[in-house]
């Protein structure tokens, strides 16, 4: 499971290693307040050999067991890396469907709680629409309704009441 | 009220309920461990392209997980 505290830790470590990234997918939507369940955190890292090296350092510090094979894949820039060998399940999506570039997604992203960079809800929706899996098609109407709810109430995200 | 409107109304009530919780609480309820056969059975996987990942999902994951077409 992925907790708020683990999110804080990830943000702190990624920032220190200067990893450029965005939360994306359902886990990203959850940061906006979308009431849904998921198992893993989906991260959209900027893809480059230099970013890959920083990402390796950050993931090691977070407690992921990175073999030479995994490190090679992170440097080589695979489009999708799934890690189940650390403190929480992590999907690294380097080339999410429906999003042209990291820079464009970053320009539309929202920082939540002053520390969590989240892809825009429009990008999360576009990505799910482009992926077009059955589970994406089933989730889209409710996710779009959530985006419309935020717009109707002039919110970037649901209010973040104190814990 | 037709089914679609009823559904929209129920979703809105869920969003309003979520708005009364803190982000910390929302995350506690949102991230749950549900074992996904095959998908969770390896500590690590990597795919050169998203198309290869989608194809692997179609060919290897149980249909009920919804990763296929």
Image (cartoon, rainbow, N blue to C red):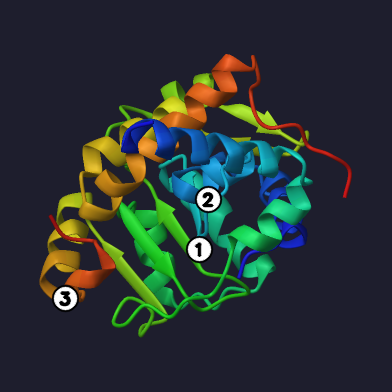
Mark 3 = which residue?
Answer: B60
Instruction: Estimate the x, y position of residue A106 in percent, counting from the top left.
Output: 51, 26
- Classify mark 1: residues with Cα within 10 Å, few (<14), some (14-19) or many (20+): many
Which quadrant of the structure image shows residue A13? bottom right
Instruction: Estimate the x, y position of residue A110 in percent, counting from the top left.
Output: 61, 27
Q: Nearer the viewer, residue A54 or A131?
A: A131
* Residue A102 in view (yes/no): no
Mark 1 = which residue?
Answer: A40
B69 shown above or below A23: below
B61 shown above or below A50: below
Quick one: quadrant of the N terminus of chain B?
top left
Which quadrant of the structure image shows residue B27? bottom right
Q: Mark 3 falls within which chain?
A: B
Q: How many marks?
A: 3
Regarding mark 1 in the picture, which secondary structure is present there?
loop
- Classify mark 2: residues with Cα within 10 Å, few (<14), some (14-19) or many (20+): many
CA gap, disc 2 and disc 1: 7 Å
Q: Residue at x 37, y 46 (%)?
A: A94
CA gap, disc 3 and disc 2: 24 Å
* Residue A29 in view (yes/no): yes
Regarding mark 3 in the picture, which secondary structure is present there?
helix
Q: Are marks 1 and 3 in contact (CB under 8 Å)?
A: no
């Amino acid at each position: 499971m992925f907790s708020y505290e683990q999110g804080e830790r990830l943000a702190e470590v990624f920032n220190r290693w200067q990893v450029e990234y965005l939360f994306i997918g359902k886990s990203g939507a959850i940061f906006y307040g979308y009431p849904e369940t998921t198992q893993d955190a989906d991260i959209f890292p900027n893809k480059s050999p230099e970013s890959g090296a920083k990402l390796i350092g950050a993931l090691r510090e977070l407690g992921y067991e990175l073999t030479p094979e995994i490190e090679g894949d992170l440097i080589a820039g695979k489009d999708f890396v799934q890690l189940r060998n650390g403190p929480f399940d992590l999907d690294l999506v380097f080339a999410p469907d429906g999003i042209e570039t990291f820079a464009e997604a970053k320009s539309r992203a929202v920082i939540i709680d002053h520390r969590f960079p989240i892809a825009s809800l429009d990008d999360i929706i576009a990505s799910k629409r482009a992926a077009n899996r059955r589970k994406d098609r089933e989730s889209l109407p409710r996710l779009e309704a959530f985006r419309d709810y935020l717009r109707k109430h002039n919110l970037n995200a649901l209010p973040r009441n104190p814990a | 009220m037709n089914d679609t409107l009823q559904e929209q109304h129920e979703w809105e009530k869920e969003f309003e309920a979520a708005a009364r919780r803190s982000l910390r609480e929302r995350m506690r309820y949102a991230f749950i461990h549900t074992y996904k056969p095959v998908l969770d059975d390896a500590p690590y996987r990597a795919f050169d392209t998203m198309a290869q990942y989608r194809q692997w999902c179609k060919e290897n994951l149980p249909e009920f997980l919804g990763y296929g077409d």
